[in-house]
Amino acid sequence: MKAGQNPLGATSKPMRLSGEVYEFLLERLMSLEIKPGERIGVDALARMLDVSQTPIREALIRLEDQGLVAKLHLSGYRAAEQLTRRQFDEMCELRLLIEPAGASKAAWLMPDADISALAALAEAMAEPSSAAGQAAYTRFAEQDAVFHARISEAAGNELLTGILARQTIHLRLFRLRRLPAVTQDALVEHSRIMSAFAARDAVAAEAAMRAHLERARDRFLKAFYT
């Protein structure tokens, strides 16, 4: 980084909507341009992006819900810390306990239209992105979160859905570092889950989800914790 350069980067034009501010901050959080634990001041962002505080606060609340930032008492926000090995292990254990069972139920309960919509999402994830580098990786992480959320919702268990949502697992895992193998392998594993759903095979859906989670755990573990 050059001397005097703002760690949040530059923007070529003023941002007006919270969605634009959200995308701007998300990409920098996922790429670690905003470092874990780094303070994010609302006033400083408003000046830099030439916007009011309202869209910035809306974007930060959304990022807080995703576990990517944390609110500080009377002093703005800070970027979430990286997952410790223990937190990583506990998240993986939780997912393996509940998501395969949720996929099993979803294979029976998900309406045909929702299966088609999920298949379309899986196909969209496999298509070349118009974005490049970190932006494409961040978009994949968001789509992956939606993929898993729709399956848990289809299981019809609000408690299960709420637990997964509160763990904010996906974006925090993908934030560790851009890892191309994560996207390539996940696409193959998603297709196996979709094949089980198309066949309404609850046993195969549970097995495919379990295999996907175990392999995802091993990929992240090898890359970041060994």
Image: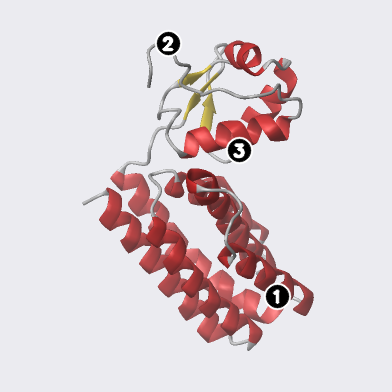
Q: Which amino acid does label 2 sit on?
A: Gly
The reply to whether the C-beta atoms of the residues labelled 3 and 2 are less than 8 Å apart is: no
Which residue is disc 2 drawn over?
4
The foreground one among 199 and 43 is 43
Q: Which residue lies furthest to the left in this view?
A: 226
The foreground one among 133 and 154 is 133
Where, by quadrant of the figure, is residue 114 drawn? bottom right
Residue 135 percent coordinates (x, y): 54, 44
Q: Residues within 10 Å of mark 2 (few under 14, many from 20)?
A: few
Q: How crowded is mark 1: few (under 14 residues within 10 Å), some or many (20 or more)?
A: many
Number of the front mark, 2 or 1: 2
Which residue is disc 3 drawn over?
65
* 195 left or right of 173 in image: right
Q: Is residue 190 above or below residue 2?
A: below
Q: Is residue 28 above or below residue 53?
A: below
The numbered dot on residue 115 is: 1
Q: Which amino acid does label 1 sit on?
A: Ile
Which comes before the other along the chain, label 2 or label 1? 2
The reply to whether the C-beta atoms of the residues labelled 3 and 1 are less than 8 Å apart is: no
| Local SS, label 2 | loop
Which comes before the other along the chain, label 3 or label 2? 2
Residue 125 percent coordinates (x, y): 59, 63
